[in-house]
Image (cartoon, helix red, strand yellow):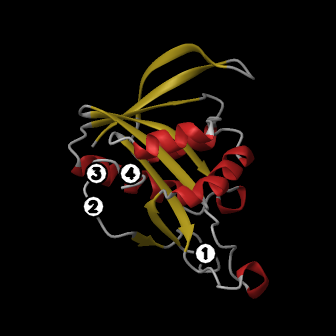
Amino acid sequence: MTGGGNFPSRADLKVGATATAVHQSVTIRDFRHPDLPALLALQAECFAAAAWLPEDYLRLAADPSGLLLVAEPTDSAPDGPAMGGVAPGAIDGFVLFLRLGDDAELENLAVALNRRRQGVARQLVDAGHRRLRAAGVKRVFLEVRPSNQPALALYASMGYTPSRVRKEYYHDPDEDALVLQISL
């Protein structure tokens, strides 16, 4: 299964954005190979996302320990943006987890600039947590820049707590990393 690894199968999760009704809803689903161009474009748009190579995503999506989920707009029109929908193959966000025994790491998370603060990141992370918990994962760790206040606020609201600091972890610009964790 592409993107799902050794995680329990489940139907796609359809969830609406938490903002006003004018915003699109999304389906959280496993990554598929045709999603790669949209995923890479989204990664390039998002400064805070880790810059991974295409082969890294494909390798981890195929790895039984990897979990790569995407948020796909659900109100896309077959004729694309001209008819009021979104372009085929568009994604609003993605999240990548790597399972390590009964722990996991949230490796990368990105949401399109025009979809931020609408609950897409929370839906992606929540879906990942549910899948990981069902696979027997007990804790999830992540690294985040202390200057990334929106991410810190999101993670804190989801129950992540500080674990430690990794000195000089990030570059361009140079910055420590805060290691956060949550028990599932």
Q: Type of residue at label 4? A: Gly
Between discs 1 and 2, the one toward the N terminus: 2
The residue at 46%/59% (across/down) is 123
Q: Nearer the viewer, mark 3 or mark 4?
A: 3
The percent position of residue 32, horizontal first and vertical second, equals 50, 58
Mark 2 touches mark 3? (CB < 8 Å): yes
Please give the residue where the numbered disc 3 appears in the rendered image: 7
Foreground of the two, 125 or 79:
79
Between discs 3 and 1, the one toward the N terminus: 3
Q: Secondary structure at mark 2?
A: loop
Q: Nearer the viewer, mark 1 or mark 2?
A: 2
Determine the image quadrant of residue 91: bottom right
The residue at 45%/40% (across/down) is 60
Image quarter in which the N terminus is found: bottom left
Q: Secondary structure at mark 3?
A: loop
Q: Nearer the viewer, mark 3 or mark 1?
A: 3
Please give the residue where the numbered disc 2 appears in the rendered image: 9
Q: Secondary structure at mark 1?
A: loop
Q: Nearer the viewer, mark 2 or mark 4?
A: 2
Question: Looking at the picture, does residue 34 appear above or below residue 139?
Answer: below
Please give the residue where the numbered disc 4 appears in the rendered image: 128
The residue at 70%/73% (across/down) is 87
Q: Decide: few, some or many residues near mark 1? Use Cα within 10 Å; few <14, some 14-19, many ≥20.
A: many
- Distance from disc 4 to disc 1, alpha carbons, whole Å, reads 21 Å
Q: Type of residue at label 1? A: Gln
